[in-house]
Image (tube, coloured by chain):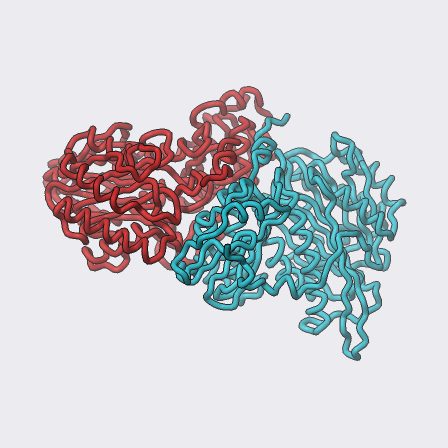
Chain colours: A cyan, B red
Amino acid sequence: MTTLSDLPVPTSSADLPPVERRPAIPAGFKAGGLAAGIKASGRPDLAVVCTTTGPAAVAAVFTPNTFAAAPVRLSKAHLAATSGDARGGFGWAGAVISTSGSANAATGPAGDSDQAEIAAMLARATGVEVELTLHLSTGVIGTRLPLGKVAAGLAALVPTLEATDDALLAAAVALRTTDSKTKVASTTVALPDDDGRPATVTVCGIAKGVGMIHPRMATMLAVVLTDASVAPEVLWGLLRPAAARTWNQLSVDGDTSTNDTVFVLASGAAGAEPVGAGSAAAVALGAALEAVARDLARQQAADGEGATTLITASVTGARDDAEARAVARSVTSSSLVKAAAHGRDPNWGRIAGAAGNARLADAAVLEASGLPADEASVRAGTPAVLDPGTLRIAIAGHLVFDGTQGGPVAFDREAARAAMDAPELVLALDLGLGTGQGEAFGCDLTESYVIENSEYTT
Amino acid sequence: MTTLSDLPVPTSSADLPPVERRPAIPAGFKAGGLAAGIKASGRPDLAVVCTTTGPAAVAAVFTPNTFAAAPVRLSKAHLAATSGDARGGFGWAGAVISTSGSANAATGPAGDSDQAEIAAMLARATGVEVELTLHLSTGVIGTRLPLGKVAAGLAALVPTLEATDDALLAAAVALRTTDSKTKVASTTVALPDDDGRPATVTVCGIAKGVGMIHPRMATMLAVVLTDASVAPEVLWGLLRPAAARTWNQLSVDGDTSTNDTVFVLASGAAGAEPVGAGSAAAVALGAALEAVARDLARQQAADGEGATTLITASVTGARDDAEARAVARSVTSSSLVKAAAHGRDPNWGRIAGAAGNARLADAAVLEASGLPADEASVRAGTPAVLDPGTLRIAIAGHLVFDGTQGGPVAFDREAARAAMDAPELVLALDLGLGTGQGEAFGCDLTESYVIENSEYTT
């Protein structure tokens, strides 16, 4: 039996600070969540996060879906208004609201009007200006939000917001739709300043769902809080590449919802110096942000509908990182690889086939990951370069294909199958062409996914 | 209840000649198939088609997968050699062999050597030159072809080849791997000549499978025969756009195999004048070719693994055909739409969401469909333009969303559900932006797909 011990491990994740899966509310924020009755189930469905020390700097990533939901469009407009930058990717905010149970997507002008009314309610309840409110929503597409219930919920919730870990956990619980688990990740990092006096800041994220994982239920949402001090555009410059390496590498079923949103809010309340663009502090804060994003993405993949295992594709030896990420994403997105993972079948032919189909991300994602705009435009959607003669593939630590040795490798199929039967299945591919590396996250495809998504719902 | 009667029907399919699902071997060909023992099941697994009047003009479309199988690479090399055109898309051939049961993919230099040996065997058995042989294979990835069985099979089969419809049907049966049905389509068309004396030619295609639809089984294959007289490069110019509108719009599970191949062979034996590029005869022959390709693609989609219904997405009102095809393909490729179709759930939110994610095909496909190379390069992978305010969606004839009326439309859910329970489910989208139109074909996602693809196979 040949093992994977000689295949390299990508350093991208190893360079990130460790995270814990517990809430750690940064200074400058208060939060809370409760059941407002939007969901028929009576589960928590309304979450609010507010700043306590004035508006926070915000960076955001939104769904590219043409049918972006009303909360997405309103949040973009508010960020554009507070920053003066029409792209709507960064700005300032004092309050974030999340409603769960109705996506307020494909609801037309009435849905926009509803969301504007919610913004006014939130502004009144929290005392922040309307343009300093941000909006998240998730749930059934095409249904209106029950404004009366949201109003009553806000009246009950806002006075009870607390700057505690438990209160942030309550917000994370209320963010959920059909998630089987609450998703939280946090880390602390020392930011070096110009005088060599590092200040410790906290980065903590909460998230829900992934993809469109339930009948007419939508959306992956994340809110990341930090008490670092950083200007909105600098924060955006840290969020975009981190998201390109984490959330953009996440796939449950290939569908991108109308509501997908990530917000990062920086309060500055830790008292550290402002993080300058390109500084050592920016690198450290970016790594902390990426560590939290990566762990939330992994939690989301593992909680994919019907999933029994997290699939991590780890690619090394690509010509560059963009090609490595393309190959990783192609592998974790393949229905056949996902089904084979479910059957614990060390089916390397499907992995090679999926890798051979890899195409680079679209121009926006390539540019967000750091490629110059010209290069991103030229390379978007082009095939990733692979060579069967240099490719090596390992499944759960078992080398199964080695192009440098002519291809298929004899391996202990039963041992590989047993190794695949774990909460995380690592598929490692070394392309043998360069130093590019990347990873992607997905889950197995199960009968439960089909059954739950084909049930007729009224 | 509002019905779909007011939504336009794309004319692309209406402009095509009618096809029949029966074999009609064109003049100038003989064919046959038998069980050579490559498949453990003992089912037919070896097919040969030969010309009877000298080499035929050939056009081909091959998988873009980096791990193209040995038969794909050898066929490309032979076409390049006989045409002198390095692209390997057209040339001349006298014999086509198909082996089923082993894909001869990811088999390294040994696999290339095996395929070259098969080419030599086929040349000896049929009396054509080695470079005039074309190769198809399908089955398990990573296993070697049993050369002895192929040799014995060829010795038995070649002397029995016949220029009959039954013999072509036998070849179609031997093309199958796990297909539940044999796939054949034929049509006849009158080609106008310069003197106004139309000559009737036959176009008949056989095909197998679609996508990678079985554990470690691969490949969609098609061989189309015609007795028209047409130069290889002209034939290629007809095949590429036809394939872009049909086979490139076909999706079962989003995976593209290592072996996908379409061959079109034109014997010229009908005695008609050569078809000139851009002539009226070329338009007529192209339509016949596309009609056969479209029907084979529909048969392949309907026979997707575990499928209970063919899903046809019919898009009108796009800014151009490329965007219409992108939207159609995005809808039929969505796991959530496919699962909803299985549950007969008129879930228009998923259709809107999938449409909103539509991105144009890659540059090669756009160029094949007729876009200038510059434009194809710029537009590849970019989002298709949609406007929620002009979009209309109908499911199985029931209008469910009308952006011009504010969005969701009241409809009879039970009636829509009943209408969805049919062998073909038509999802119609009118984008309301222009005159572009296109269609795509897929199938529902079922528990059977997952079960069959996750079973451990030895």
Rendered location of residue B325, percent (x, y): 42, 43
Q: Is residue A294 above or below residue B331?
A: below
Q: Nearer the viewer, residue A130 or B104?
A: B104
Q: Is residue A421 above or below residue B338?
A: below
Quadrant location of residue B288?
Answer: top left
Quadrant location of residue B336?
Answer: top right
Rendered location of residue B120, percent (x, y): 19, 51
- Asked whether residue A285 appears in the rendered view, the answer is yes
Q: Residue at x 71, y 68 (%)?
A: A284
Q: Quadrant of the C terminus of chain B?
A: top left
Rendered location of residue A366, percent (x, y): 54, 60
Q: Nearer the viewer, residue B156 or B227?
A: B156
Q: Nearer the viewer, residue A294 or B346?
A: A294
Q: Residue at x 22, y 36 (%)?
A: B203
Q: Nearer the viewer, residue A163 or B308?
A: B308
- Asked whether residue B280 appears in the rendered view, the answer is no
Q: Quadrant of the N terminus of chain B?
A: top right
Q: Is residue B255 left or right of residue B86?
A: right
Rendered location of residue A424, percent (x, y): 62, 49
Q: Is residue B314 left or right of residue A267?
A: left
Q: Is residue A209 above or below residue A76?
A: above
Q: Is residue B404 above or below residue A192?
A: above
**Across the whole image, how many numbered discs are drawn on residues?**
0
Q: Is residue A396 left or right of residue B191?
A: right
Q: Residue furthest right?
A: A159
Q: Residue furthest bottom?
A: A195
Q: Is residue B221 left or right of residue A312?
A: left
